[in-house]
Image (cartoon, helix red, strand yellow):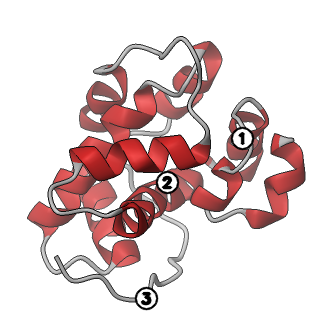
Amino acid sequence: MTVTTMQPRSPLTTSGWADLVEAVRETGRYPTAAEAELVTRIVLSGFGGVLRGDSREAFTQVLPPEACEALSSTTAEILQPTAREFVESMATRIEGATPATARWHVSSVLNVLAERAGTPTTARLISQLPPGYALLFGLAELMGTAA
């Protein structure tokens, strides 16, 4: 898997699964839609275990049904993992990933989710997560919100 520099994206105007995967493909500079789709499904499934109650609901309102299914495929973990623990868990789930490439994959997907949900919804979510998630969403300016 080849990874290059992440590119900022313009706001999305559609909400279908193919559009979501394409946004992840462009953001993460993945060579194929199939690779972007696989990463998206794995990250969403894992992130579903991090989310609690209304946080999950907020994202299901802005995501296509396929993404909601992936997000809902995992029950919430008893203890929310730190951002670092979450990335490390993704490294074990994504074939050939290291912690560094897993961070790239996670950020590629979460950046697109942040675009879809908008800053107020994402900021509310980040405030309910352990420290470090703001960076994964590409929103370093919200780091104080997560403390």
In front here: 69 or 42?
Answer: 42
Q: Is 3 placed above or below 104 here?
A: below
- Secondary structure under the numbered disc 3 in the rendered image: loop
Q: Residue 5 carries which label?
A: 3
Q: Residue at x 54, y 25 (%)?
A: 51
Q: Position of residue 123 (x, y in %)?
A: 76, 44
In front here: 63 or 56?
Answer: 56
> CA separation, marks 2 and 3?
16 Å
Q: Say which residue label 1 marks.
A: 126
Circle 2: is it few (<14), some (14-19), or many (20+) Cα within 10 Å?
many
Q: Which residue is drawn at 59% across and 25% down?
A: 80
Figure quadrant of residue 23: bottom left
Q: Which amino acid does label 3 sit on?
A: Thr
2 or 3: tag closer to the N-terminus: 3
Figure quadrant of residue 105: bottom left
Q: Which amino acid does label 2 sit on?
A: Leu
1 or 3: tag closer to the N-terminus: 3
Q: Say which residue label 2 marks.
A: 110
- Secondary structure under the numbered disc 1 in the rendered image: helix
The answer, for residue 137, to whether it is visible in the render is no
Drawn side of residue 57 relative to residue 119, left or right: left
